[in-house]
Structures are given as C-alpha cells and as structure tokens.
Image (spheres, grey):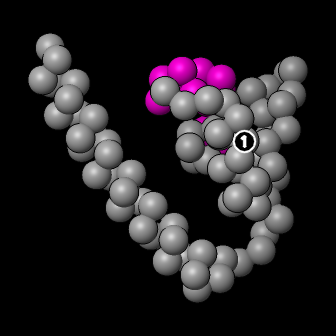
C-alpha cells in the first residue's frame, strides 16, 4: 500500500479498490513510521523518519509480504471463479 501511494495513487481510491477503510491505510503508514500528508495540489506526500527496521520488524515485514502474496493469489482465484 505504501508503494502504491508513493506512486501517487489516491488512498481513498485504494481503499475502495482493496476493500479496506482509509483509516486502515493511515494506520499502516503510522506502523511503518511513514506519514501521509494530504495535499491539494498532489495526491499526497510520503514522509519517512528514515529509521532502519529492527530485526523483528524485518521479520514481520517478510511475513506480511508472504501473506499478501497468498491473499493476492486467492483473490485472483476467486475473481476467476465468479466470472
């Protein structure tokens, strides 16, 4: 999600696309140590505190990436099954 917003995707649109609430996205930003500042001229600005991840955070990130990949695969299977 952080990468998508960094690519100038609108968090409100992403929340609709992925079926999550925009406050969830904001919570994920805070958990990652990144602040999203809404801006009228752009879709937003990402500001990082540039703090390196601890070993536990790196493990959690790896785990979450694996889960995301699994969920994306499952979502694709379900999308095909409904068509």
14 in relation to 46, above or below: above
Residue stretch in magenta: 6-18
Q: With respect to residue 60, does 45 lie above or below?
A: above
Q: Is residue 59 above or below residue 41?
A: below
Q: Which residue is mark 1?
A: 26
- Say whether residue 22 is left or right of residue 56: right
The percent coordinates of residue 54 (x first, y second) are 65, 82
Q: Is residue 20 visible?
A: yes
Instruction: Indicate the quadrant containing the N terminus: top left, top right, bottom left or bottom right.
Output: top right
Tell me the residue at 15%/24% (across/down). 80
Q: Looking at the rendering, in which quadrant would you find the C terminus?
A: top left
Could you tell me which residue is drawn at 32 percent across and 45 percent down? 71
Pointer 1 local density, CA inside 10 Å: few below 14, some 14–19, many at least 20: some
Instruction: Please give left or right for residue 31 compared with residue 71 in the image.
Output: right
Residue 15: x %, y % from top left: 57, 27
Q: How many marks?
A: 1
Question: Residue 8: in sight, yes or no?
Answer: no
Q: Quadrant of residue 8?
A: top right
Q: Position of residue 44 (x, y in %)?
A: 78, 33
> Residue 39: where, in percent of width, then height?
86, 28
Q: SS class of the residue under badge 1?
A: helix
Q: Residue at x 17, y 34 (%)?
A: 77
């Amino acid at each position: 999600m952080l990468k998508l917003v960094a690519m100038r995707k609108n968090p409100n649109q992403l929340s609709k696309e992925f079926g999550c609430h925009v406050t969830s996205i904001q919570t994920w930003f805070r958990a990652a140590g990144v602040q999203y500042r809404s801006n009228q001229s752009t879709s937003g600005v990402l500001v990082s505190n540039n703090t390196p991840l601890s070993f536990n955070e790196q493990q959690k990130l790896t785990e979450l990436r694996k889960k995301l990949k699994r969920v994306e695969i499952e979502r694709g299977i379900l999308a095909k099954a409904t068509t």
